């Protein structure tokens, strides 16, 4: 892979210092990734049925699949390149994460309860939160919990290894994660990950390492902009095509190539990170302030947007079947993102609630 090959031959940038431009770039990357999450969930409503609207859903869903991986990569870029006291690290992260999980879970449980789903007594509510996300998109918060436990140890691996060792570790992680989708693509009947115990390397750890490495070498990598742009476009086309091909083959829409750890989503995410991070350097002062403000709202927007999307669809009957479905999906996503931002901006004015936004 181009990115892996090129970084292995480069000298790393100076470590651990976050300059003003990098902060701007991460703001831009974070906001665009958050919008892609909203776009993905807006497009997903029409994926389950083959009809005249299905291709629009497939296109936007494929385009937005790199959204959550980019969030993991941002975390890796910001956290792996420094060393912190493990107990201070846990205190700083979990003092914000745990209330966020609990409060947003309660909000969605209240909503589910309003719609007829019962959780029983107080212990039943507590058990439901402990057992996992009460709304599908909250899985990300639970996943971050486990990654935060691991990051202090990954910091030591990252800081103490040289470039080639980092690249090797990244390759093992990404390839281990991509094997299930590759096995499906080439119709391999063996469970390679289980047979060779590669599950210890598979998962979102690879994205953390990728974010740290790509941030460290971004100036070098983005000298070859065409390769990054072409790589991203080809990856998105592959996600769309193979989703269509295997869905048609099996007679029902399949999401195997939508998985955040599928081979083409991994590749698309790496290129997207490079492209959009570099684009942040070209923002005018107005847009620097614009994305700085919205960057501070992204956690809250992520958590609340499903509720806003549900209400918009129910109250106004907005969906991809209104007018031109190719326009309706992104327009609805923009509306949901904007309304979510307004609501979170209001919530942020309440001091006690800022921690969950």
Image (spheres, rainbow, N blue to C red):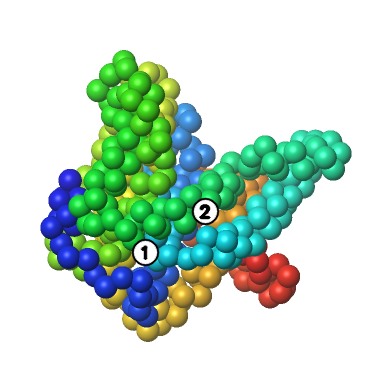
**Helix, strand or loop under label 1:** loop
Tell me which label, 2 or 1, sits earlier in the chain.
1
Residue 81: mark: 1
* Residue 203, quarter of picture: top left
Q: Report the residue at 37% width, 75% height from top.
A: 18
* Residue 95, quarter of picture: bottom right
Q: Report the residue at 17% width, 65% height from top.
A: 11
Residue bearing the label numbered 2: 148
How far across and how far down the image is residue 54, in percent? 41, 35
Whether residue 181 is visible: no
Whether residue 152 is visible: yes
How far across and how far down the image is residue 114, in percent? 79, 43
- Toward the right, the furthest residue is 121
Count the labels in the image: 2
Rendered-image quadrant of the C terminus: bottom right
Q: Report the residue at 70% width, 52% height from top.
A: 102
- Residue 296 position (above or below residue 107): below
How far across and how far down the image is residue 305, in percent? 58, 54
Residue 256: mark: none
Q: How crowded is mark 2: few (under 14 residues within 10 Å), some or many (20 or more)?
A: some
Q: How many angstroms separate mark 2 from mark 1 (CA)?
A: 14 Å
**Helix, strand or loop under label 2:** helix
Task: Give whichever of 313, 340 is nearer the camera.
Answer: 340
Q: Residues within 10 Å of mark 1 (few under 14, many from 20)?
A: many
* Residue 302, quarter of picture: bottom right
Task: Give whichever of 267, 159 is nearer the camera.
Answer: 159
Does 25 sit left or right of 120 as displayed? left
- Residue 176 position (above or below residue 79): above
- Toward the bottom, the furthest residue is 285
């Amino acid at each position: 892979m181009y990115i892996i090959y090129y970084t292995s031959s480069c000298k790393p940038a100076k470590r651990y210092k976050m300059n003003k431009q990098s902060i701007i770039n991460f703001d831009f990357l974070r906001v665009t990734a958050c919008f892609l999450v909203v776009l993905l969930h807006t497009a997903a409503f029409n994926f389950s049925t083959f009809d005249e609207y299905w291709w629009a859903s497939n296109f936007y869903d494929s385009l937005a699949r790199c959204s959550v991986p980019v969030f993991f990569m941002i975390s890796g870029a910001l956290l792996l390149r420094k060393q912190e006291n493990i107990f201070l690290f846990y205190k700083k992260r979990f003092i914000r994460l745990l209330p966020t999980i609990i409060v947003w879970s309660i909000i969605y449980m209240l909503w589910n309860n309003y719609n007829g789903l019962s959780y029983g007594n107080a212990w039943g509510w507590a058990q439901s939160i402990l057992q996992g996300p009460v709304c599908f998109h909250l899985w990300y918060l639970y996943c971050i919990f486990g990654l935060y436990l691991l990051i202090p140890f990954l910091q030591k691996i990252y800081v103490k290894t040289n470039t080639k060792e980092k690249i090797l570790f990244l390759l093992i992680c990404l390839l281990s994660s991509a094997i299930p989708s590759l096995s499906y693509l080439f119709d391999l009947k063996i469970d390679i990950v289980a047979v060779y115990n590669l599950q210890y390397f598979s998962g979102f750890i690879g994205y953390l390492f990728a974010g740290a490495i790509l941030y460290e070498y971004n100036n070098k990598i983005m000298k070859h902009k065409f390769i990054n742009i072409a790589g991203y476009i080809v990856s998105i086309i592959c996600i769309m095509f193979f989703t269509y091909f295997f869905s048609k083959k099996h007679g029902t829409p399949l999401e195997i190539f939508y998985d955040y750890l599928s081979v083409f989503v991994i590749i698309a995410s790496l290129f997207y990170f490079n492209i959009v991070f570099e684009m942040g350097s070209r923002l005018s002062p107005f847009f620097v302030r614009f994305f700085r403000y919205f960057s501070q709202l992204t956690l809250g927007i992520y958590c609340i947007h499903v509720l806003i999307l549900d209400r918009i669809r129910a109250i106004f009957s907005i969906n991809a079947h209104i007018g031109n479905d190719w326009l309706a999906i992104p327009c609805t996503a923009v509306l949901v993102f904007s309304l979510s931002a307004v609501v979170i901006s209001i919530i942020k004015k309440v001091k006690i609630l800022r921690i969950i936004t």
